[in-house]
Amino acid sequence: MTDDARFEDAHERPLRLKALEPDDLPVISALVQDAVFPVTEMSWLPAKRRFAVLLNRFRWEDLPAEERRGTYERVQSLLVVEDVLKVSSQGVDRRDTDLILSLLSLAFTPGEDGAGRLELVLAGDGGIALEVEALEVSLTDVTRPYVAPSGKAPRHPD
């Protein structure tokens, strides 16, 4: 009997996705659900109008294979939002450098002429709101997958 294929043996490529329309966003939102990141891994560059966060995201796209193998994986991914005019947060203490945040979803509320508000909804009633001139969100895997430290898939109460 042979073992299941490993990531190293496959020809999988890292995810590289972009949302330019509100209808594109649910795919990225689903893939970043339950991503965790230290508060220190968020960055807003006002001069470049760019907000970025380095996430440790659960590999939901590989869940059936992970369940068969009994090994769950995460991967570091860069979530980047362009054309950001303003950033605000609620329930996030940026001074607490040990704070780990858990991302639940992304939600976009359109405004006039393609502008709008992108919300990063966090566990624990926290959130980050980005006022954008236009919707442009990208998600790019930047490392190889690694075994999830918890050894489990994230679960949510029904």
Image (cartoon, helix red, strand yellow):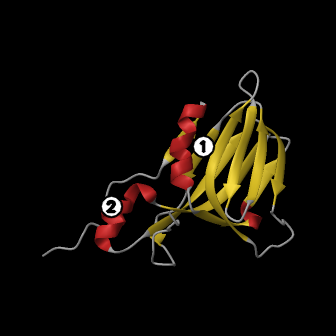
Give the alpha-carbon distance from disc 2 to disc 1, as whole Å: 25 Å
Which element carries disc 2, helix, strand or loop?
helix
Residue type at numbered disc 2: Pro
Q: On screen, 156 above or below 121?
A: below
| Quarter where residue 117 is shown | top right
Instruction: Count neighbours of disc 1 (C-alpha within 10 A) and say few if under 14, some if 14 to 19, many if 20 or more.
Output: many
Q: Position of residue 147 (x, y in %)?
A: 45, 74
In the image, which is nearer the foreground, mark 2 or mark 1?
A: 2
Residue type at numbered disc 1: Ser
Residue 117 appears in the picture as rendered: yes
Residue placed farthest to the left in the image? Answer: 1
- Residue 19 badge: none
Quick one: 97 or 111, which is closer to the camera? 111
Position of residue 16 in the picture relative to residue 109 (left or right): left
Residue shown at the point (79%, 39%) measured from the top left? 131
Instruction: Please give the residue where the numbered disc 2 appears in the rendered image.
Output: 64
Residue 20 appears in the picture as rendered: no
Which element carries disc 1, helix, strand or loop?
strand
Residue placed farthest to the front in the image? Answer: 158
Position of residue 66 in the picture relative to residue 20 (left or right): left
Q: Position of residue 107 (x, y in %)?
A: 65, 43
Instruction: Please give the residue where the numbered disc 1 appears in the rendered image.
Output: 138
| Quarter where residue 65 is shown | bottom left
